[in-house]
Image (spheres, helix red, strand yellow):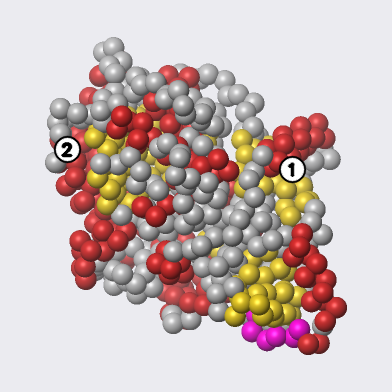
């Protein structure tokens, strides 16, 4: 606890100006996972700083969420609204802002969908991404995420090694910005030894074995076809928490390195995630993004460092886009005049978390349900692959990549694997779904959210082109299971008006020319069918 005492001493000695910035972000980390897992290093950060108990991502997918974190912009403005999609070239990143102010900028990212192709390397003097880690470690570290031996060098370990090596070579005369993006604990949940052996994951290992070599059927896992996910849920969740504990161990190495360098007490350290993970919420399992449930939207958010309250918690609603407008003044820097940021400065709550929470409204949207087995959603699939529009019983599908121009009709009620074309027997259904497709082009039918500290309004697209709305009182119903709009008509009206106005500003989702290498990795990660 020496570093905590040192940080506290500096804070009480006059609130010195922070010098360095460290952002530690973790892929797929639910906000509630920390309380359910032994995470002594994350807990130490919380004990030394201020925790926002209510923070959300703008989209529960990696690229758009991190792009918001690094730009302060909503996805509709920075341009990335789906995993793998790049930001607009003209967007300015936090790394660019800090480099102009004389900072050395360093980043290590363990996910290919958070790398150079998406523009997330912009502004970094040193950027190590997924392919770089593969090249550095070659056969020492896993390539195929579906076949990972327990004694492998852990992905988070490799990322930490590279980050600390880059940090050791940084110019000591200059302040630095270090961003780490840990890939663990993304599905498949395969923690290395000894964390792997500390939990009973037998049913989850069996699930992996059952679908080994049948990755095209992974959608049946994510949507619990035949109950396959539900049977393995407890075991998979134990392995997930083991991966969280393993990642926490690696985060501890970063904290210890900062302490050894004598820089911890003079640095702002931010801990967060890109999004959460669903374990059955909204009938989505071991995945995220297909719906707008808080299981996927809520993220942890902790700030430590000079000028930040120690051991405090606040209920102020925050978003990932709040990081740049919060961090720049905290570091004593001005926001560039040409940069119009969407997020807000959380500084008042960092200085005094007892400040009352505002009645702020924030907005979010789901991503595209990528796997075609998600037949309860209006639209599934990516524009560059197989896309389907779904009615109560049938799904009409096209495959832009393999058989452009052809269509298939599947009876998903009796054929959940979508394997047998029945179009010739139901020409009237084909015509009806083709008409619905004119209302909902591929990737456009997304859930959208207006959120306050207490209430959450969710609009869900319907086949006829409309939305059905539900209002949830999160204070009494965190599971989002009871629609209370009839009990709170004024809240419902105000949030609906705000959400409709926000949605009207969103740019259209156009067709994409996709990078084959990114497409293949997303397929392995479970982001593509």
Question: Closest to the observer: 140 or 4?
Answer: 140
Q: Give SS at disc 2.
A: loop
Q: In the image, is 93 to the left or to the right of 415?
A: left
Question: Closest to the observer: 246 or 364?
Answer: 364
Question: Closest to the observer: 39 or 247?
Answer: 247
Q: Position of residue 4 (x, y in %)?
A: 27, 29
Q: In the image, is 115 to the left or to the right of 513?
A: left
Q: Position of residue 29 (x, y in %)?
A: 45, 50
Q: In the image, is 232 to the left or to the right of 411?
A: left
- Mark 1 neighbour density, 10 Å: few (under 14) some (14–19) many (20 or more): many
Residue pictured at 25% horizontal, 19% vertical: 9
Q: In the image, is 382 to the left or to the right of 165?
A: right
Q: How many marks?
A: 2
Question: Closest to the observer: 401 or 521?
Answer: 401
Disc 2 or 1, which lies upstream in sequence?
2
Choose top left, top right, bottom left or bottom right for residue 271. top left
465 within the magenta span: no
Instruction: Decide if residue 309 is in sight here.
Output: no
- Residue that carries the numbered disc 1 in the rendered image: 471
Q: Does the magenta stretch mainly form a helix, a strand or a loop?
A: loop
- Mark 2 neighbour density, 10 Å: few (under 14) some (14–19) many (20 or more): some
- Residue that carries the numbered disc 2 in the rendered image: 170
User: In the picture shown, does residue 233 fall above or below 316?
Assistant: below
Marks 2 and 1: which is nearer the front? 2
Residue pictured at 71% horizontal, 68% vertical: 389
What is the C-alpha distance between the residues marked 2 and 1? 50 Å
What segment carries the magenta color?
418-423
Q: Position of residue 356 (x, y in %)?
A: 57, 20
Residue pictured at 61% horizontal, 35% vertical: 362
Residue pictured at 30% horizontal, 61% vertical: 131
């Amino acid at each position: 606890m020496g570093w905590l005492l040192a940080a506290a001493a500096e804070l009480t000695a006059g609130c010195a100006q922070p010098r360095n910035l460290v952002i530690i972000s973790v892929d797929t980390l639910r906000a509630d996972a920390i309380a359910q897992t032994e995470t002594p290093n994350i807990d130490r950060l919380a004990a030394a700083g201020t925790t926002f108990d209510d923070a959300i991502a703008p989209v529960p997918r990696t690229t758009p969420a991190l792009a918001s974190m690094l730009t302060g912009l909503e996805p509709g403005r920075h341009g990335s609204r789906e995993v793998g999609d790049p930001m607009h070239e003209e967007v300015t990143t936090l790394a660019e802002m800090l480099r102009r102010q004389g900072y050395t900028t360093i980043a290590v990212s363990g996910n290919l969908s958070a790398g150079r192709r998406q523009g997330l390397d912009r502004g970094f003097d040193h950027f190590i991404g997924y392919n770089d880690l593969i090249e550095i470690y070659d056969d020492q570290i896993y390539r195929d995420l579906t076949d990972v031996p327990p004694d492998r060098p852990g992905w988070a370990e490799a990322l930490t090694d590279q980050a600390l090596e880059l940090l050791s070579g940084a110019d000591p005369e200059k302040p630095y910005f270090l961003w780490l993006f840990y890939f663990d604990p993304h599905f498949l949940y395969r923690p290395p030894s000894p964390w792997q052996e500390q939990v009973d994951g037998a049913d989850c290992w069996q699930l992996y074995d059952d679908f080994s070599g049948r990755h095209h059927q992974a959608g049946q896992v994510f949507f619990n076809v035949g109950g396959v996910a539900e049977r393995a849920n407890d075991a998979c969740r134990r392995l997930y928490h083991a991966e969280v504990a393993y990642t926490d161990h690696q985060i501890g190495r970063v904290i210890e390195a900062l302490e050894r360098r004598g820089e911890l007490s003079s640095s702002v350290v931010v801990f967060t995630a890109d999004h959460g993970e669903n374990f059955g919420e909204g009938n989505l399992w071991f995945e995220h993004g297909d719906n707008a449930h808080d299981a996927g939207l809520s993220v942890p958010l902790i700030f430590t460092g000079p000028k930040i309250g120690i051991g405090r918690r606040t209920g102020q609603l925050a978003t990932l886009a709040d990081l740049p407008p919060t961090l720049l003044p905290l570091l004593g820097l001005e926001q560039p005049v040409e940069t119009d940021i969407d997020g807000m400065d959380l500084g008042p709550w960092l200085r005094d978390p007892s400040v009352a929470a505002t009645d702020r409204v924030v907005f979010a949207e789901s991503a595209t349900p990528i796997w075609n087995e998600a037949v309860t959603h209006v639209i599934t699939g990516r524009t560059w692959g197989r896309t389907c529009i779904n009615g109560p019983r049938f799904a009409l599908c096209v495959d832009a990549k393999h058989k452009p121009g052809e269509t298939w009709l599947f009876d998903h009620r009796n054929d959940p694997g979508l394997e047998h074309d029945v179009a010739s027997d139901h020409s009237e259904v084909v015509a009806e779904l083709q008409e619905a497709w004119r209302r909902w082009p591929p990737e456009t039918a997304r859930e959208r959210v207006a959120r306050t500290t207490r209430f959450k309004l969710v609009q869900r697209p319907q086949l006829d082109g409309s939305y059905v709305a539900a209002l949830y009182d999160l204070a009494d119903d965190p599971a989002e299971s009871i629609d209370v709009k009839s009990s709170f008509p004024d809240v419902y009206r105000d949030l609906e008006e705000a959400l409709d106005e926000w949605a009207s500003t969103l740019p259209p989702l156009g067709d994409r020319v996709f990078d084959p290498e990114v497409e293949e990795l997303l397929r392995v990660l479970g982001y593509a069918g």
